[in-house]
Image (cartoon, helix red, strand yellow):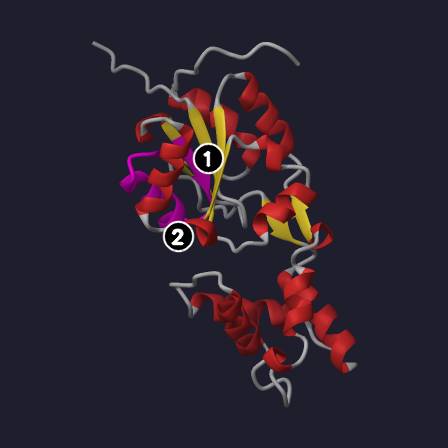
Amino acid sequence: MAARKPLLRAITFDAGGTWLHPWPSVGAIYAEVATAWTGRHFSARDLTRRFQEAWRARPDFDHSRARWMEVVDAVFAGLLPVPPSRTFFGELYERFRHPDVWRVDPAFPRLLMRLRRRGVKLGLISNWDLRLRPLLRALRLESGFDVIVVSAEIGFAKPSPSIFLHAADALGLPPDQILHVGDEPVADVEAARRAGFQAVLLGRRPQSSAPHAIRSLRQLEPWLRRAGFQWPASRSGP
């Protein structure tokens, strides 16, 4: 007897690194603000590398303003006589509130519309600070989600399964009827599965060829068809 196909009633997405990206890069934005403040030139590529190192050194990052200050000081350590926390950190922190330093994956808004027409609920589960909701509003994407769960608002973050279970409660669905899509193997995929969710990894590198991985958001719907999910009744209307 064939196995029953799983029912898919909701899809949740990670934000940063999945469909939302700093533009043109973290390092370029850091360099722009630092140059305007100091009059010195900074390499965007070097600052991006430094940011990645500082980020990896803080696996339990809580997205508070104080922790962001630590990261920015680490990025500029040895490059400036006075750390950014005492000079331009506030300006840099505010810069990332604005939609012009972010780019949305061009496939994402249309993907949300198509999924909603299939009758699927849509959610966002993100490790982020309190700047995320205003940013979503400015990007005109806040209304695209039925549920938005932000780590700084609820007090726990990925990879804790608690943040996924919170989203499931908000969606009013059992976890096994929800699929999570994200770009982090541990924080998104492993943690979601520990919470009882289905999960798929968005991995843009060539080695991301596992059965539960896609290389772009355009591949999500074909992957869902191959996985054999049952859809809820489609909604009518445009």
| Image position, residue 96 (x, y; %) | 65, 59
Label 2 sits on a secondary structure element that is loop
| Image position, residue 221 (x, y; %) | 51, 25
Closer mark to the observer between disc 1 and disc 2? 2
Above or below for 181 versus 155 = above
Q: Name the residue under label 2.
A: 157
Start and end of the magenta stretch?
179-198
Query: In the image shown, does 228 or 237 lie closer to the viewer?
Result: 237
Identify the mark nearer the N-term, 1 or 2.
1
View extreme (left): residue: 1
Q: Quadrant of the C terminus?
A: top right
Above or below for 92 versus 161 = below
| Image position, residue 32 (x, y; %) | 74, 69
Q: Name the residue under label 1.
A: 12
Q: In this view, does 167 lie to the left or right of 83?
A: left
Q: What residue type is labelled 1?
A: Thr
Q: Is residue 176 left or right of residue 77?
A: left
| Image position, residue 120 (x, y; %) | 48, 22
Quadrant of the rendered image containing residue 209: top left
